Image (cartoon, rainbow, N blue to C red):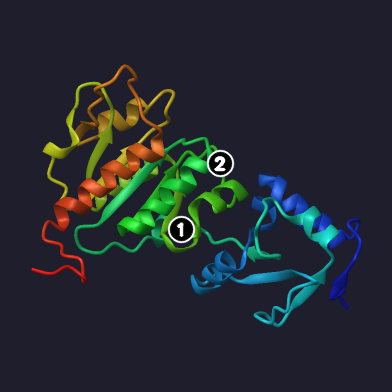
Amino acid sequence: MEENFITSVQNTRIKHVVALQQKSALRREEGLFVVEGQREIEHCIACGYEVKELFVLDSLNYTGHLHTTIVTPQVYEKMAYRESTEGIIAVAKCKGHRLKDISLKKHPLIVVLESVEKPGNLGAILRTAEAAGVDAVIVCDPLTDLYNPNLIRASIGGVFSVPTAVCTSKECIDFLKANKICILTAQLQDSYDYYDYDMHEATAIVMGTESTGLTTVWREAADAHIRIPMLGRLDSLNVSVSAAILMYEAVRQRHKVYQHPDARM
């Protein structure tokens, strides 16, 4: 029978949680990840994730899960990746994130990210994608996994609710073309201002890394190349900022007539 009250940081279950926080290879091997905070955990469950274990600080009176293990402050501090997570940590089962599981509606808006290396940037993009109502995010040739703790924190739960697939660039290009989705690559070379391109129809906005941009395979597959005007001395924006600008341009075009519910004529 598993312990329901743990006081030692040397406990094997506690060490396992710490290892899952730190090692992407272990997350991939076991298909498990760690999520911290009551709001994030409840959102994770609401989005269909299966929670395998729940650890709660002994000073809390939390009854939100049948299989709860109580831990001391010292044990919780050992497990926690970040501060201010309300004393609740869960181990959950990863999803498959297969391209074939993406369900497309009419005129979908998709964000494609090629080899984005920083988990915080990918998490921020997922957070914005959730807010903008993006239909899917496709991560090509990833350099970080979707369940990196920094990514989960930056996404504020967006990683759980935004339909997300992981695949190669070739697989993604074949998928987009098969579904007649217009490919817009964000690049400075041979491009024109993003607000001059019609995004009403099925559209995929493709972003590359901040350091090298998109690879040739994407530039050649594109239906159009778009750019964000750079009027200062620097020639690039953070990739999450660029993605937000382009996502909300599509939102602007698709919802030209919008009035806040509290607005008055």
User: The residue under label 2 is which amino acid type?
Assistant: Thr
Residue 235 lies, in percent from the top left, at 32, 21
Residue 58 lies, in percent from the top left, at 80, 72
- Which disc, if any, is residue 6? none
Q: Is residue 171 above or below residue 152?
A: above
Residue at 23% of width from left, 38% of height from top?
184
Evaluate whether residue 210 shows in this view. yes
- Which disc, if any, is residue 158? 1
Between disc 2 and disc 1, whose residue precedes? 2
Evaluate whether residue 180 shows in this view. no
In depth, the one of 172 and 111 nearer the eye is: 111
| Mark 1, other Cα within 10 Å: few <14 / some 14–19 / many ≥20 | many
Q: Taking 134 as reference, is 211 left or right?
A: right
Residue at 70% of width from left, 83% of height from top?
66
Residue at 87% of width from left, 59% of height from top?
12
The C terminus lies in which quarter of the figure? bottom left
The residue under label 2 is 144
Q: Taking 30 as reference, is 217 left or right?
A: left
Q: Taking 20 as reference, is 154 left or right?
A: left
The N terminus lies in which quarter of the figure? bottom right
